[in-house]
Image (spheres, helix red, strand yellow):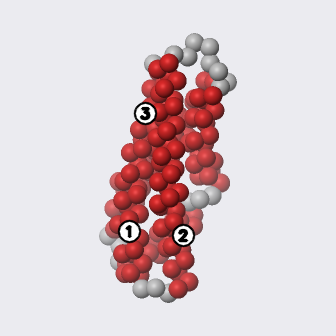
């Protein structure tokens, strides 16, 4: 059971880290080339599409599976493995804290601005730089979490 939980922790964290990395290295640079109106519309549609079924399972699994892997007793688990799982969990939790405290409120403000008819340039100015700043913090955290969890499985 413990091996399965660690595998699920690694798998969900790896999927989420890949998603974050693709956003940082591909999607946001591509969206940066759009006009203000195109950018705002594209980000609104992305924010509507992403938080659904499979994504939410992965998002929750990134924290739930490392918690379970840490607390399920394992015969023969070394202290190093235990601390690597805990460190991975802490990085994943910090990633989620940034997401919940930073990115999601900006996404919500972006969605709300659609009803107010605010000028796209003002909406983008209030959103893009701050959202990317939070994203540049959370992406390395989840990539590090993936590395730590993977290391726990191989040491």
Side (left or right) of 64 relative to 33? right
Q: Residue at x 36, y 59 (%)?
A: 133
Residue designated by label 1: 128
Place of residue 34 in the rendered image (x, y in percent of width and height, measured from the top left): 35, 73
Residue 58 marker:
none
The earlier-in-sequence mark between 3 and 1 is: 1
Place of residue 75 in the rendered image (x, y in percent of width and height, measured from the top left): 62, 14
Q: Quadrant of residue 8?
A: top right
Residue 108 marker:
2
Quarter of the image containing the N terminus? top right
Q: Quadrant of residue 125?
A: bottom left
Local crowd at mark 2 within 10 Å, few (<14), some, or many (≥20)? few
Q: Residue at x 42, y 44 (%)?
A: 141
Residue designated by label 3: 147
Instruction: Pick whichever, 147 or 71, lies toward us.
Output: 71
Side (left or right) of 116 relative to 31? right
Would you say the residues marked 2 and 1 are in contact, meaning their CB atoms lie under 8 Å apart?
A: no
Local crowd at mark 1 within 10 Å, few (<14), some, or many (≥20)? some
Instruction: Pick whichever, 103 or 114, lies toward us.
Output: 103
Q: Residue at x 37, y 81 (%)?
A: 121
Instruction: Pick whichever, 38 or 4, lies toward us.
Output: 4
- Secondary structure under tag 2 reads helix
């Amino acid at each position: 059971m413990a091996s399965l939980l660690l595998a699920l922790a690694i798998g969900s964290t790896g999927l989420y880290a890949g998603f974050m990395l693709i956003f940082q290295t591909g999607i946001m640079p591509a969206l940066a080339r759009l006009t203000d109106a195109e950018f705002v519309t594209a980000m609104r549609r992305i924010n509507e599409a992403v938080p659904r079924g499979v994504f939410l399972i992965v998002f929750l699994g990134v924290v739930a599976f490392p918690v379970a892997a840490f607390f399920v007793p394992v015969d023969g688990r070394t202290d190093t493995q235990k601390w690597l799982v805990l460190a991975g969990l802490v990085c994943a939790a910090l990633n989620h804290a940034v997401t919940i405290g930073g990115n999601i409120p900006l996404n919500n403000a972006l969605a709300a601005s659609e009803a107010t008819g605010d000028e796209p340039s003002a909406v983008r100015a209030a959103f893009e730089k701050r959202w990317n700043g939070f994203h540049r913090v959370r992406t390395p955290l989840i990539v590090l979490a993936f590395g730590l969890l993977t290391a726990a499985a191989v040491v």
